[in-house]
Image (spheres, rainbow, N blue to C red):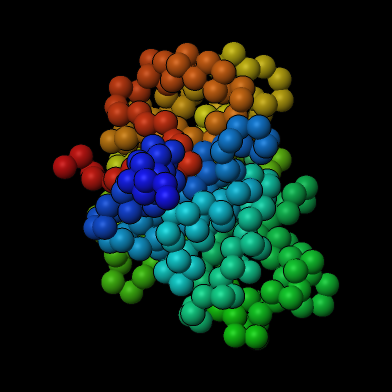
Amino acid sequence: MPDLRFIAVILLLCGWADSHAESCPESGVAVQVLGSGGPIADDDRAGSGYLVWIDGRARVMIDAGSGSVLRFGEAGARFEDLDFVGLSHFHTDHSADFPALLKSGLFSPRRRPLRIAGPSGSARFPGLDDYLDGLLNPDNGIYRYLSGYLDGSRGAAMIEPRTVGGDAPRTVFGDADSALRIDGLRVPHGIVPAVAFRISAIGRTIVFGSDQTLSNENYVEFARGADLLVAHMVIPEETTGTANQLHAKPSAIGEAAAAAGPDTLLLSHFMARSLEDIDGNVTAVQRHFDGRVVLAEDLSCVAVNGGD
Ligand SMILES: [Zn+2]
């Protein structure tokens, strides 16, 4: 008979215990990282995904990248608690697990609608409407067996899509008592339509910048005064070539953060190339931004205290 206390200690040391119960507070606002990695399966991290916990419930999910639904379950989140899912753009490391989330949700007691938002499409790249139609169209969608999410059949909760286009921010969610409000803003990510989200929840503000070059001059204003700013540090400082047209360098992330003035900057979406000299890249950020900097790990949780 093995010593159960010994096994329990080993499990704790290996991080196999319920991490949400230990790391995310049961009251107030917190952001939990579902995926802190990129599109390549070599970084031991899921693709992009985040939960916003509000008073012990995961009410907002931003991105559903590859592997994030596994983390969703590990975090102890429940589909029926979600008020909003934001898909920042349609690269796999931000959206590949969305149909898996919907399928999993069919086994939940949820019947109320689910608001989702994403970019409107362009002539060169699909947006949210194209994405939903391609997946869920009852006649020719790849996952037509989940088409109840579009028409309410088969007991599925209806999806309420909202697209974000143009130059100005758009409010994509607001609950009746104004305790939770979400705005979206288009951000530049090569030819890929992409959206940053600003979440205002019971007096706290979180901005998820998504993948972008930071060249939209409206973005700093959109992000200004956030308690927590989430920035994707995909490329190292010395990057040249096409990656520069998709992503911001660490120094640009630091400059934008300094201008927006968040209480905490959460760096995420790492790839092998940005992790190789992570200290140097963080230093490049901190050369401009002198606030608190936190590095994301899958399932790590950051309480959003607003500096109090
Ligand atoms: Zn991307």
Q: In which quarter of the image is residue 135?
A: bottom right
| 96 in relation to 298, above or below | below
Front-most of residues 50 and 180: 50
Instruction: Report whether 211 appears left or right of 13.
Output: right
| 284 in relation to 79, above or below | above
Residue 181 in the image: state x and y as whole percent. Answer: 37, 61
Residue 7 in the image: state x and y as whole percent. Answer: 40, 44
**Residue displayed at 42% across by 15% down:** 283
| 286 in relation to 245, above or below | above
Q: Is residue 221 visible to the viewer in this orientation of the structure?
A: no
Residue 23 in the image: state x and y as whole percent. Answer: 32, 46
**Residue displayed at 40% across by 63% down:** 59
**Residue displayed at 46% across by 72% down:** 80
Looking at the figure, which quarter contains the C terminus?
top left
Instruction: Report whether 1 appears left or right of 133.
Output: left
Residue 96 in the image: state x and y as whole percent. Answer: 67, 53
**Residue displayed at 45% across by 16% down:** 279
| 114 in relation to 95, above or below | below
User: Looking at the image, in which quadrant does ligand 1 appear?
Assistant: top right
Q: Is residue 73 visible to the viewer in this orientation of the structure?
A: yes
